[in-house]
Image (spheres, rainbow, N blue to C red):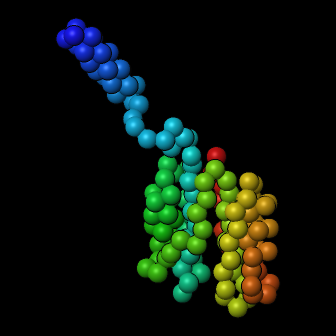
């Protein structure tokens, strides 16, 4: 009885060591392939900041806020494996859009605007 248990344990340990040497970790298989982006804006100044190709939404959002470089920056849109865009209307209202390419993301941001004469302020795509 002891020999099969030892053999099974040896196989499990070998697989675990091989996995760690190859950089395999527990978690969703697609986690490494998703690329996140985000666009942040400052409501007081209209300054925007963006990020792209981050491994998580949290990292992308933090990078967008950091690149906005205003104390009141906040994320308006995040996206994964696609594009995002933000627009600002004459009344200073903001809207955003996502899409599989920059043209669709910007069209969606303008289409979502509640104010008149929205203008794209920032758009960005992941690779």
Location of the N terminus by quadrant is: top left
Position above or below: 21 against 27: above
Farthest-out residue, left = 2
**Percent of width and height locating residue 56:** 49, 53
**Percent of width and height locating residue 103:** 79, 60
Q: 6 left or right of 116?
A: left
User: 25 or 97: nearer the eye?
Assistant: 25
Say whether residue 73 is visible: yes
Rendered residue at 54%/87% (across/down): 44
Q: 42 left or right of 119?
A: left
Farthest-out residue, front = 1
Rendered residue at 68%/77% (across/down): 95
**Percent of width and height locating residue 80:** 60, 54
Position above or below: 124 against 31: below
User: 55 or 2: nearer the eye?
Assistant: 2
Rendered residue at 41%/31% (across/down): 24
Farthest-out residue, bottom = 91
Say whether residue 63 is visible: no
User: 20 or 73: nearer the eye?
Assistant: 20
């Amino acid at each position: 009885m002891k020999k099969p248990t030892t053999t099974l344990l040896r196989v499990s340990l070998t697989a675990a060591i091989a996995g760690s040497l190859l950089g395999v970790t527990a978690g969703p298989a697609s986690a490494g392939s998703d690329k996140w982006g985000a666009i942040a804006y400052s409501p007081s100044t209209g300054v925007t900041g963006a990020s792209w190709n981050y491994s998580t939404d949290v990292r992308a959002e933090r990078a967008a806020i950091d690149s906005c470089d205003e104390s009141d920056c906040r994320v308006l849109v995040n996206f994964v494996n696609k594009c995002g865009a933000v627009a600002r209307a004459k009344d200073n209202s903001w809207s955003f859009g996502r899409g599989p390419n920059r043209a669709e993301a910007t069209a969606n941001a303008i289409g979502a605007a509640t104010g008149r004469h929205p203008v794209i302020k920032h758009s960005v795509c992941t690779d």
